[in-house]
Amino acid sequence: MLSDELILRVHDVAKAFGGLVAVDHAHLELHRGQLIGLIGPNGAGKTTLFNLIAGYYAPDAGTITFEGHEIAGMKPYDVCRLGIARTFQTTKPFLECTTIENILVGALLREPSVKKAESIAERIVDLLDLGAVAQARGSELSVPNRKLLEVGRTIATGSTLLLLDEPMAGLVPTEKEQVLKVLRRINADGRSIIIVEHDMRAVMSLCSHIVLLDRGKVLLEGTPQQVTEDPRAIAAYLGDDYAAASN
């Protein structure tokens, strides 16, 4: 459930790689229970911003505050211990381990007992509708189940903020619906989510707030309706065809 409590604040954050500015003094705020869509064209800086929040890169400028802690420049494992976990565009399950065992790895971040970690993993398998493949090896999982497995490992860490990088990429419409159903359930269970995704119909139906990045800058933000009706969003990313179809 969305609250008024601000848990993440990205302020004036910048990151360059040589002469390439990937994130250009960007800002973002997230309240507890909120589900934000981070959108924009390829190369807009979305994944780099995720990497900055999650600790994979240190920003060149700006601050990132989570739950009252300044986390800019912290190591990924320390950021995760504070409560932020992320997925990646390419799924990488442990191929010889079962679904339960893959998720169990995430639970061991906070739970030293393997037995208790396995119990946590079993509950997450149920939450993600992965019961039918709970004992299947990672190498045997379908693409949508691998995507859900990645999400499951982030939940297992006990994180309250999930950064999901294209969890529906490569899926057909029925598979996307399965993922959307699960993400809504996770959000209703109390976790905040920022999602990067290129399927605009999925994002607009899922998220309450949209942030559009373009060339590393936050071009605009607002409700899905506000963004889809904004000429700047249409020109920079959505296109006239999407705008026409959504009206």
Image: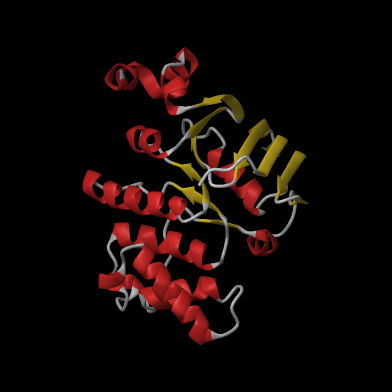
Q: Residue at x 32, y 71 (%)?
A: 139
Residue at point 37%, 33% (across, down):
200
Q: Residue at x 69, y 33 (%)?
A: 19
| Residue 94 appears in the picture as rendered | no
Identity of the residue drawn at 28% across and 52% down: 178
Q: Is residue 173 left or right of residue 76?
A: left
Q: Position of residue 53 (x, y in %)?
A: 64, 48
Occupied quadrant, residue 111: bottom right
Viewer-closest of 120 and 3: 3
Residue farthest along the top direction in this orientation: 231
Residue 221 in view here? yes
Left or right side of 55 for 238 = left
In the shown orientation, is residue 170 left or right of residue 197?
left
Residue 27 percent location from the top left of the image: 66, 33
Image quadrant in which you'd find residue 128: bottom left
Q: Nearer the viewer, residue 96 or 124?
A: 124
Q: Nearer the viewer, residue 65 or 61?
A: 65
Q: Eyeballing the image, is 1 above or below 149?
A: above
Vertical placement of residue 96 versus 150, above or below: below
Q: For the image shown, how many numbered marks are present on the structure?
A: 0
Q: State the quadrant of the C terminus.
A: top left
- Where does residue 35 sit, x and y in percent of width and height? 49, 42
Image x and y of residue 242, in percent: 32, 22
